[in-house]
Image (tube, rainbow, N blue to C red):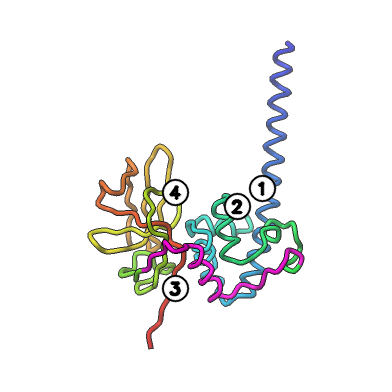
Amino acid sequence: MKSAKKTTRKKAARTASEKEKQVGKRELHESLLTALRRLMDTSDVSPRDRAATIAAMAKTTRQSAHRWLTEEGTGVPDLVSFKALVEALGADANYLLGLAGSPDEAGDAEPLDEVDGFAARVRSASATATYFTMTGDEMAPTVPKGALVVAEAGADKVDGSGMYALEHKGTRTVRLIEQRFGKGLTLKCENRSYGEIQISNGDLEKSGLKLIGKVVAVAHLTAF
């Protein structure tokens, strides 16, 4: 009887703990959503392109960024993505976390400028950055044909889900890669006209693909 009561108390404690975590995650999501919206409202980035812009900054997938920007969700970035986002935005982490009511309270963070944001993402790639032009429309509209792609070079393996630069038969391209433990890798295109590629063993080289690294920034160029 005592053992049963003890087990019941443990279950109740775990349930209460999980509820507290969910509430905390929801509050964190709301703080991040509010901060990102304020920063985006001061920029030249259109609402349609915000998820893609945030995804490029955080070096993650557009789907993940969309969850952070959706009111109904509770999505929050992992620490690696959050660090990249803070650096690219030039914002104070306390402001994004809701620990400061405004950028001024958080420190010297300035409103996001599209050019400055792009430059910050390029700088974050350090001296290992590599550049190339997207030759196809598989990743449109996020990475349209003719866009300048900046990626971190020298990666020897996929480090979490995100947007990656790849090389196939001498041609460089971009794909969204989802890393599913125990299930390998899934390569996706933003353009729904193209299908997914499943690599069950997670070995890109055996599939004829060379990994370059995570995409850091994308610039849409217009020639006159």
Can you tell which quarter of the image residue 213 is in? bottom left
Identify the magenta region: 105-131
The answer to which of 20 and 218 lies nearer the viewer is 218
Instruction: Tell me which amino acid carries mark 4.
Output: Asp
Residue 117 magenta:
yes
Query: Could you tell which of marks 3 and 4 lies nearer the N-terminus?
Result: 4
Residue furthest front as drawn: 127
Query: Could you tell which of marks 2 and 1 lies nearer the N-terminus?
Result: 1
Query: Could you tell which of marks 2 and 4 lies nearer the N-terminus?
Result: 2
Give neighbour class at mark 1: few <14, some 14-19, many 20+ (Cα, 10 Å).
Answer: some
Mark 2 touching mark 1, by CB under 8 A? yes
Residue pictured at 39% horizontal, 73% vertical: 147
Give the foreground label among 3 and 2: 3
Percent across and percent down for residue 22 are 67, 43
Residue 142 magenta:
no
Can you tell which quarter of the image residue 114 is in? bottom right
Secondary structure beneath label 1: helix
Identify the residue under disc 3.
Answer: 219
Identify the residue under disc 2.
Answer: 76
Instruction: Tell me which amino acid carries mark 1.
Output: Lys
Percent across and percent down for residue 32 are 65, 58
Identify the residue under disc 4.
Answer: 159
The image shows residue 205, relative to residue 163, as above or below, that is above
Instruction: Tell me which amino acid carries mark 3.
Output: Ala
Query: Could you tell which of marks 1 and 4 lies nearer the N-terminus?
Result: 1
Percent across and percent down for residue 90 are 61, 66
Query: Could you tell which of marks 3 and 2 lies nearer the N-terminus?
Result: 2
Instruction: Tell me which amino acid carries mark 2.
Output: Val
Q: How many angstroms separate mark 3 from mark 2 (CA)? A: 26 Å
Residue pictured at 70% horizontal, 45% vertical: 23
Give neighbour class at mark 3: few <14, some 14-19, many 20+ (Cα, 10 Å).
Answer: some
